[in-house]
Image (cartoon, helix red, strand yellow):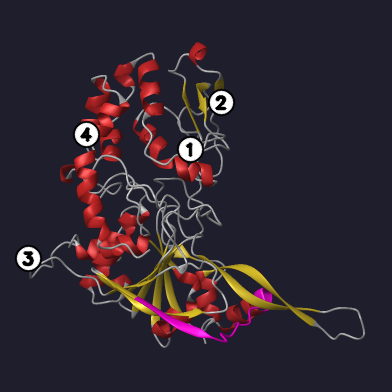
Amino acid sequence: MKYNIYRFTTLISLLLLSVSCSSKKSVSQRKPGGDTMTLNSRSIDATFKTGAENFESYLPLLENKKIGIVTNPTGIINYHSIEMIFVQDPRINNQAKIVNKEVSIVDFLLHKNISVQKIFAPEHGFRGTADAGELIKDGKDTQTGLPIISLYGNNKKPKPEQLADIDILVFDLQDVGARFYTYISTLHYVMEACAENNIPLLVLDRPNPNGAIVDGPILEKEYKSFVGMHEIPVLHGMTIGEYAQMINGEKWLKPSNNSRQALQCDLKVAPCLNYSHDMKYSLPVKPSPNLPNDQAINLYASLCFFEGTNVSVGRGTEKQFQIYGSPFLPENEFDFSFTPKPNFGAKDPVHNGKLCFGEDLTKIKKVNQLELKWLLIAYNKTTDKTVFFNDFFTKLAGTKKLREQIEAGMTEKEIRKTWQEGLEQFKKMRQKYILY
């Protein structure tokens, strides 16, 4: 077979031997907008599992099928394997111990003799090394030999010819719960392409590390873009599987050429086990190059507004999305400074080589809402307010109102009050698709 040699070496290097289930029970849920399959859950193991780790549930759907997979370095599983440890004691030939291995979903499927045909890569690429916004090119994965199709740049949606040899598409990306994090935009286009080409989509669900927070202004439809495709708040409080069901259920996919009705994706979601939205979840790998840790992921939605201003969020440092600063902020008003320089994930950072003054937020407590205070502080203290905002700010906010409110001198409390009606309406809609 095409990948026999690769599979053999993967098998040897990872020492993967499937752990059999001694006792199983069925768990099933059904929600509008898509089916959640019946799961087989080990009764002897009540620990949390991602959808990708419930491999007994979805592998039967993939057998004897040609598979395409949308993934990147976040598509990993803790695969319980048996590693044989040889001991020098002559009385013991060997002993076994259970170990956790972080295995790429691609490697795992190949090891299971699933016929993976190609990889579709979102923003930052399959191996996750590209800058935010950097053009991703098609290529070949050096480790597996599989072709890689870019879904970022000029080709955000899989083309019919790219799906021609695919029986089912698998989607496994780790989202962070923010509207402008582009993995949910990629999800939309993948669902649309699957619906147009009559290809089923299997979403392997993963927790939302900001899953208990629903907050921020609602996007207005005239400001839709790749950093905001749907009329939702900045923090939506949904897993990517729940969000896929919302896309289907709210009929957000565009109508087909021959119909006025919105397309429907043949969607299945493999849910997480023993997960709740208020559960603390620390990501095992960086979801993108400039979100290096839990603190950055928690502050991302609040600080990302600075990407639409002349203020740096720490790209080009080791504290991305945990600090902010600018040469336009007065030195005497701040006791923290930094100088951005090119590094992994930021080849030409904002204010490259310039001394920036601002705040260090690496030690603050976890936030439980979308915070505007740092944006308001920076705007009010900047030396030239006429160059503070740029055009990208409105795309990030999803509305012109936020910039207008800040420029008018409204307080954070006053601004937040204007969001409440929209948030209440969204929460009611959201509830229909919640799995956990």
Q: Position of residue 10 (x, y in %)?
A: 62, 76
Q: Quarter-wise, where is residue 360 in the image?
A: top right
Please say whether residue 8 is visible from this viewpoint: yes
Identify the residue position indicated by label 3 in the image: 260
1 or 2: mark nearer the eye: 1
Q: Position of residue 386 (x, y in %)?
A: 29, 18
Between discs 2 and 4, the one toward the N terminus: 2
Report helix, strand or loop for mark 3.
Answer: loop
**Residue at image location 51% in from the left, 25% down from the top:** 359
Question: Which amino acid, by three-letter code, is at mark 3?
Answer: Arg
Q: Position of residue 67 (x, y in %)?
A: 40, 78
Identify the residue position indicated by label 4 in the image: 418
Report helix, strand or loop for mark 2.
Answer: strand
Between discs 2 and 3, the one toward the N terminus: 3
Q: Left or right: where does residue 191 sit relative to residue 376?
A: left
Other residues around mark 2 within 10 Å, as few (<14) / some (14–19) / many (≥20): many
Identify the residue position indicated by label 1 in the image: 321
Residue closest to the eye, 272 or 341: 272
Q: Pointers 2 and 3 in contact (CB under 8 A)? A: no
Other residues around mark 3 within 10 Å, as few (<14) / some (14–19) / many (≥20): few
Q: CA distance from mark 3 to mark 1?
A: 42 Å
Q: Which residues are magenta?
A: 12-28
Q: CA distance from mark 1 to mark 2?
A: 13 Å
In the rendered image, the vertical position of residue 240 relative to residue 388, given as above or below? below
The numbered mark at residue 333 is none
**Residue at image location 36% in from the left, 48% down from the top:** 178
